[in-house]
Image (tube, rainbow, N blue to C red):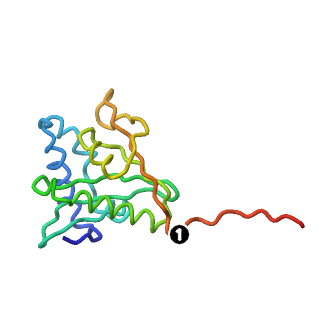
Amino acid sequence: MQIRAARPHEAGELSELALRSKGHWGYDRDFLARCSAELTLAPGDIERRRTSVAEHGGRILGFVTVQGDPPHGELGMLFVDPPAIGTGVGRRLFQHAVAVAEALGFTRLEIGSEPHAEPFYRAMGATRTGTIPSGTFPGRNLPLMSIATTPLHPRPTARRHTDS
């Protein structure tokens, strides 16, 4: 399996994968239809959201996005195709996202988690820091997770110059 940058023409395929992955948790068609806009990537989103895919034998197994600007960012989307769930693809994508964040100078990533995915994020070292409202379903709250990262290129801090 390799992880590589997603390509703009893959936006539709990634959006379909996100819906299949969300459907893995037993949500009905109405629920998934209402989530569709939130889970849709446009070609212009691919680079802007720093989208990476896990691929094996020419087949995309999952994808992840790292969004925002340092020092704090967001792991915006992490979806694995249902046949690949439990095979380590999610773990590799998560580790890749953290490495990307560190290379860009992020000190923390926040994750608005699917409730069923919270145990996965905990296993990856994230902690629950609160809840956030669903962007699709009024009254539904989602776990807010966070993971500290170690930036490879920390931002310079202002130094005080004092007279001796």
| Residue that extends furthest to the left in the rendered view of this protein | 83
Neighbourhood count class around disc 1 (C-alpha, 10 Å): few under 14, some 14–19, many 20 upward: few
* Position of residue 117 measured from the top left corner of the image (x, y, whole percent): 26, 44
- Nearest to the observer: residue 70 or residue 44: 70
Q: How many marks?
A: 1
The image quadrant of residue 56 is bottom left
The image quadrant of residue 100 is bottom left
Residue labelled with disc 1? 153
Q: The residue under label 1 is which amino acid type?
A: His
* Position of residue 42 measured from the top left corner of the image (x, y, whole percent): 28, 58
Q: Measuring 39% from the left and 36% from the top, which residue is drawn there?
A: 132
* Position of residue 85 measured from the top left corner of the image (x, y, whole percent): 15, 53
Left or right of residue 135: residue 34: left
From this view, report whether residue 60 is shown above or below residue 75.
below
- Nearest to the observer: residue 149 or residue 79: 149
Q: Measuring 15% from the left and 34% from the top, which residue is drawn there?
A: 30
The image quadrant of residue 160 is bottom right
Q: Measuring 37% from the left and 47% from the top, which residue is drawn there?
A: 111
| Residue that extends furthest to the top in the rendered view of this protein | 139
| Residue that extends furthest to the right in the rendered view of this protein | 164
Image quarter (top left, top right, bottom left or bottom right) of the C terminus: bottom right
For mark 1, give the secondary structure. loop
* Position of residue 147 measured from the top left corner of the image (x, y, whole percent): 42, 51
Image quarter (top left, top right, bottom left or bottom right) of the N terminus: bottom left
